[in-house]
Image (spheres, helix red, strand yellow):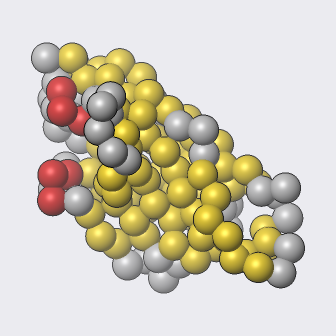
Amino acid sequence: QVRLVESGGGLVQAGGSLRLSCVASGRIFSINAMGWYRQAPGKQRELVAAITSGGSTNYADSVKGRFTISRDNAEHTVYLQMNSLKPEDTAVYYCNGNILADYRFREYWGQGTQVTVSS
């Protein structure tokens, strides 16, 4: 069974930094795109950043220049470095992966990690 487990969330003051990590485990054959999404109270889940297996990235306009997504393919891990954090970045952050396991690709989600930015 494939699992995605996030870590690195917490409480930080505006202007601070956090680094999120997400490790995929289980009987994984390969992973295509991985990404980070977030959901603030009362809002829909939105894409923050995504990265392909080849390293191509895309970001939400609201985080461009402040957040950096990266991955370690050998370790099945994706990271999100978040700098210059703002109160509006407060949300539960979810890891997502398009993973080949048991002979088919499926979307998998982590359980989420809370990021709170105080003003």
Q: Residue at x 13, y 17 (%)?
A: 119
Where residue 75 appears, as percent x and y from the top left, is 67, 60
Q: Nearer the viewer, residue 40 or 60?
A: 40
Quarter of the picture containing the N terminus is bottom right
| Residue 9 relative to residue 43: left or right | right
Is the residue 46 above or below the residue 5 in the image? below
| Residue 50 relative to residue 95: left or right | left
- The quadrant in which residue 25 appears is bottom right
Is the residue 107 above or below the residue 42 in the image? below
Q: Residue at x 25, y 23 (%)?
A: 117
| Residue 40 relative to residue 88: left or right | right
Q: Residue at x 43, y 70 (%)?
A: 51
Q: How many marks?
A: 0
- The quadrant in which residue 64 appears is bottom left
Where residue 73 appears, as percent x and y from the top left, is 61, 69
Is residue 61 visible in the rendered image? The answer is yes
Where residue 63 appears, as percent x and y from the top left, is 20, 51
Is the residue 106 above or below the residue 19 in the image? below
Is residue 71 visible in the rendered image? The answer is no
Where residue 85 appears, as percent x and y from the top left, is 20, 34
Q: Residue at x 17, y 37 (%)?
A: 84
